Image: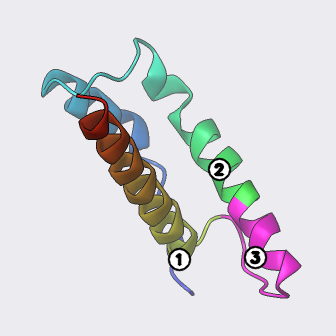
Amino acid sequence: MKNTIDTAITPAKIRAMQTLGVPYPEGYDKIANADLFKQADKIVASLAKDKIEVKNDKEIIALIAYLQRVGTDIKLEQKTAGSN
């Protein structure tokens, strides 16, 4: 829980993924870090309810966000598959 997220190159990563076909909206590279910290703040608040204190710029928060996204994508995929 010690490692800090490096957000310095996030905009460049977003632009690179856009060139590879990832459907990020135009200009998302300029607001991606704000979205990142908005989500991180929600995770930190949720953990605080369980008396777990961690800053919003730690890699563990990014890992939790990633796992939440995977869960969301799996549920969406199952819902979409079930509607065929």
Q: Which residues are magenta?
A: 43-56
Which of pointers 3 and 2 lies earlier in the amino acid sequence? 2
Asked whether, in this view, residue 6 is left or right of residue 41, the answer is left
**What residue is pinned by disc 1?**
60
Cα distance in 3D space between marks 3 and 1: 12 Å
Q: Is residue 64 above or below residue 30?
A: below
Mark number, residue 42? none
Give the image location of residue 71, x and y in percent.
Answer: 42, 58
Residue occupying image coordinates x 74% and y 57%: 41
Look at mark 2 in the image and give the residue it sits on. 39
Earlier along the polypeptide chain: callout 3 or callout 1?
A: 3
Residues 14 and 12: in front is: 14
Please rate how many residues cluster around mark 3, counting C-alpha atoms within 10 Å: few if below 14, some from 14 to 19, many from 20: some
Name above or below for residue 9 compared with residue 42. above
Quarter of the picture containing the N terminus is: bottom right
Label drawn at residue 47: 3
Question: Percent position (x, y) of residue 72?
Answer: 45, 50
Q: Residue at x 57, y 69 (%)?
A: 61
Residue furthest left in the image? 20
